[in-house]
Image (cartoon, grey):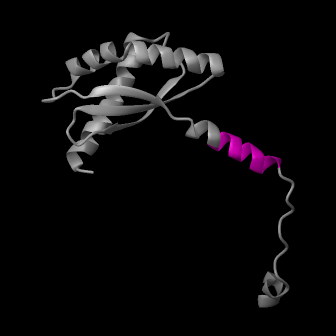
Amino acid sequence: MSKRVTRVNELLKREVSLVLHTRYQEAALGITILEVETLATLRGAKVFYAVLGDEARIREAHTFLRSHAEEIRREVGKAIVLKFLPHLEFLRDDSVERGARVNAIIDSLDIPPEPPPEGDSPALKE
């Protein structure tokens, strides 16, 4: 990935998040922009987001972002000057939830710690 695309990704991430949390405060509550992946041509970008809350809140956020994508794009376009402002496609990233589930499973396991091998006792090394 070129340096330019990387810079555009970070700029879009910051500006989309700013628009969501300033203009759409109530609807964007609990939505976090995690990453933006822009095409090399700068014609399109995938905006990955996470949502805090239950399934109903996730559906609300999905519906909101899909229906307001062009408005958000226009607002971002006012702050960013690019030859081509990418079309924004919002995709939910559930990796945070999967990670939390894996951690909960690991924490629930009752695995006793392994005793140190007999030859590696710290008292014997002195």
Is residue 93 in view from this perspective?
A: yes
Residue 87 place in picture, x, y as percent: 28, 26
The boundaries of the magenta stretch are: 99-108
Residue under the image location 29 percent in, 19 percent down:
73
Is residue 126 in view from this perspective?
A: no
Residue under the image location 63 percent in, 43 percent down:
99
Asked whether 104 falls inside the magenta stretch, the response is yes
In this view, 115 is above or below 33: below
Asked whether 62 falls inside the magenta stretch, the response is no
Foreground pick, 126 / 78: 78
Q: Viewed as shown, does residue 22 lie left or right of 27?
A: left
Q: Viewed as shown, does residue 22 lie left or right of 110?
A: left
Q: Main secondary structure of the magenta part?
A: helix
In which quadrant of the rendered view does residue 77 lie?
top left
In which quadrant of the rendered view does residue 119 lie?
bottom right
Residue under the image location 58 percent in, 21 percent down:
58
Pick the quarter of the image with the C terminus.
bottom right
Residue under the image location 62 percent in, 36 percent down:
97
In which quadrant of the rendered view does residue 8 lie?
top left
